């Protein structure tokens, strides 16, 4: 049929023949140009990438738990701003994601308010108690990381309260209502929820209070689809709802909280709670290939991420390709240097982190010269240069963006999954085990000083939320869980979006690597091709396969659209558009 049409057109004359002959070439030229434009823009409609984000126009919430994400999106729909949604999500995750969501832990939050063009960093991470000397003197307490002895002063309630007091729009009590209802009336346990709790059954069951909450009276585990209630936690949340942060740090809840901990041998005191202060400060800022990026200052890991990105900037990452042997080798070498820099990150007020030196572009240029494709960097090289010369676990993250352009990037944690695996009696509050992060037994001289366990010292953390700005406005909001993996994961996400120009969902799902120090293996997620392993081994890497790394929750704001990407490495994570909320 096609041949007949062509023959008829040929018979119409020479002009028709010329048009016909030109058409295939025109079509090819059009496709080539279109492909070039797609490569430049990371087009979402062309389907050249496997993964695609959730798209909305009225706001977006991305969190590790779908129910909490839905609550955040509903708050936005009801007229709340990004900070209101962040508060509601934070308290809801304490109910729906007990292994990481919390009011007994701490974290770091970045907030950008569109109208005032203000970007701030809220440090509400754990702080050492006043009697930390007892912890230092007793090796038994240091070694019992899952106990009442390893609890840092919790900062979550103070942090969420401070964010709301500065930037919130809806009444405080409205924001806690969903979490209270979930704890009091119960929630339907998901497959992931049942699995995670049961996985920790042996450790959680050792603590009477935790056993009462997470398992049935006969000791059996809850199953998927069953109703899971937390009445003590509901009561605690109701007091915080009525009295704000004062309830947790000074009120009757505070007294019950501390009394229960001290009865179990913990050293945390009412004086410690009263002493705690949220630190509201400026973010650290750095540039990567023309993008202006905000992250958390020390004791968080933002300056190390900056150092890693400064090193990456010295190399043609896009030309090397995504997850090729060459790009993996390069990133692994850079991560070694970055993790060495983390030795210098410590908590105030007893330690001054050399932030300017670590973030120096000149510092990065000098060290980039050590990185070669044919062999590994040596420990001697790693330790030969100090940033001082350039001075002038389980965690969860969620991102929120509202229609007005306000954004929140928040990461908080109990330190380990389920923290210390103990609950403050009659409160339902799982407690952190953040004192394990005190590196008082480290032999490295810098790290030994930066992590020394001193009274009321802010504990250092790898947590690294980010907001990337484009033309002065938030463009990418992201963060991840992952302990020592966090800074490397964030570097890979940023590079995937900026260097390789993947859409945010594709950038999120790309396989990841992890490298610590010069004497540790290079870990690859299973999705990375086997073909690169012998090439990496020839360069000197000891390659090991790894379970999935991290769980980034990200939003891209482009023109009038919000693109949300929840990381499927953690089941039940969700990106919820406000447009989809009924």
Image: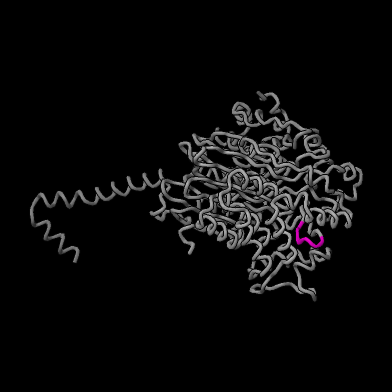
Is residue 366 rendered to the left or right of residue 450?
left
Colouring mode (rainbow / by chain / secondary structure / one colour): one colour
- Rendered-image quadrant of the N terminus: bottom left
Asked if residue 319 can be seen in this view, the reply is no
Tell which of 518 and 373 is nearer to you.
518
Is residue 10 rendered to the left or right of residue 117?
left
Is residue 151 rendered to the left or right of residue 312?
right
Q: How far across and down, in percent of the image, does residue 122 sit?
A: 65, 42
Residue at 77% across, 55% down = 431
Q: How far across and down, in percent of the image, does residue 436 sit?
A: 80, 48
Tell which of 249 and 364 is nearer to you.
249
Q: How far across and down, in percent of the image, does residue 474 sit?
A: 50, 42
How many callouts does the rendering have? 0
Q: How far across and down, in percent of the image, does residue 394 sit?
A: 70, 54
What residue occupies the far bottom of the structure in this picture? 218
Asked if residue 174 can be seen in this view, the reply is yes
Magenta part of the chain: 425-430
Q: Name which quarter of the figure residue 67 lies in.
A: bottom right
Our reading of the magenta stretch's main secondary structure is: loop
The answer to whether residue 428 is magenta is: yes
Q: Name which quarter of the figure residue 198 lies in.
A: bottom right
Residue at 79% across, 45% down = 274
Is residue 40 rendered to the left or right of residue 269?
left
Residue at 65% across, 46% down = 486
Tell which of 375 and 203 is nearer to you.
203
Tell which of 576 and 74 is nearer to you.
74
The answer to whether residue 537 is magenta is: no
Residue at 84% across, 48% down = 269
């Amino acid at each position: 049929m096609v041949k007949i049409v062509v023959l008829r057109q040929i018979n119409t004359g020479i002009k028709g023949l010329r048009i016909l002959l030109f058409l295939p070439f025109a079509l090819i030229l059009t496709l080539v140009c279109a492909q070039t434009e797609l490569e430049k823009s990371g087009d979402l409609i062309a389907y050249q990438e496997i993964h695609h984000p959730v798209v909305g126009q009225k706001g977006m919430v991305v969190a590790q738990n779908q129910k909490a994400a839905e609550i955040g999106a509903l708050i936005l729909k009801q007229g709340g701003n990004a900070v209101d949604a962040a508060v509601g999500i934070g308290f809801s995750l304490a109910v729906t994601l007990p292994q990481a969501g919390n009011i007994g832990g701490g974290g770091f939050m970045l907030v950008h308010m569109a109208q005032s063009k203000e970007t701030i960093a809220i440090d509400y991470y754990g702080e050492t108690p006043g009697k930390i000397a007892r912890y230092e003197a007793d090796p038994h307490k240091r070694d019992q990381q899952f106990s009442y002895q390893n609890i840092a002063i919790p900062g979550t309630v103070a942090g969420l309260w401070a964010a709301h007091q500065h930037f919130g729009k809806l009444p405080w009590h409205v924001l806690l209502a969903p979490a209270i209802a979930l704890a009091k009336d119960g929630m339907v346990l998901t497959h992931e929820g049942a699995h995670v709790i049961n996985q920790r059954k042996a450790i959680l069951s050792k603590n009477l209070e935790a056993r009462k909450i997470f398992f049935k009276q006969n000791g059996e585990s809850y199953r998927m689809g069953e109703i899971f209630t937390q009445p003590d936690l509901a009561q605690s949340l109701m007091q915080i709802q009525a009295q704000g942060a004062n309830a947790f740090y000074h009120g009757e809840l505070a007294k019950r909280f501390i009394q229960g901990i001290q009865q179990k041998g913990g050293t945390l005191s009412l004086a410690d709670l009263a002493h705690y202060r949220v630190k509201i400060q400026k973010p650290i800022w750095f540039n990567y290939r023309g993008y202006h990026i905000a992250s958390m200052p020390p004791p968080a890991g933002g300056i190390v991420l900056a150092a890693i990105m400064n090193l990456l900037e010295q190399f043609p990452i896009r030309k090397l390709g995504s997850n090729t042997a060459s790009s993996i080798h390069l990133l692994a070498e850079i991560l070694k240097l970055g993790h060495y820099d983390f030795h210098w990150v410590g908590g105030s007020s007893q330690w001054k982190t050399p932030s300017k030196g670590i973030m120096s572009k000149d510092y990065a240029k000098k060290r980039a010269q050590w990185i070669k494709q044919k062999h590994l960097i040596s420990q001697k090289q790693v330790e030969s240069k100090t940033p001082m010369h350039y001075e002038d676990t389980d965690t969860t993250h969620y991102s929120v963006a509202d229609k007005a352009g306000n954004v929140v990037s928040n990461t908080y944690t109990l330190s380990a999954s389920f923290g210390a695996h103990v609950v403050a009696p009659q409160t339902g509050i799982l407690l952190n085990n953040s004192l394990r992060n005190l590196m008082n037994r480290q032999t490295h001289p810098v790290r030994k000083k930066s992590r020394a366990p001193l009274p009321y010292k802010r504990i250092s953390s790898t947590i690294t939320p980010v907001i990337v700005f484009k033309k002065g406005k938030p463009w990418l909001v992201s963060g991840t869980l992952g302990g020592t993996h966090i800074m490397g994961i964030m570097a890979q996400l940023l590079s995937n979006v900026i260097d390789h120009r993947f859409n945010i969902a594709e950038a999120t799902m790309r396989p990841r690597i992890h490298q610590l120090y010069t004497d540790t293996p290079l870990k690859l997620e299973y999705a990375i091709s086997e073909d690169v392993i012998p090439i990496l081994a020839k360069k000197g890497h000891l390659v090991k396969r790894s379970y999935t790394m991290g769980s980034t929750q990200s939003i891209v704001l482009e023109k009038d659209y919000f693109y949300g990407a929840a990381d499927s490495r953690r089941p039940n994570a969700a990106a919820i558009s406000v447009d989809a909320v009924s």
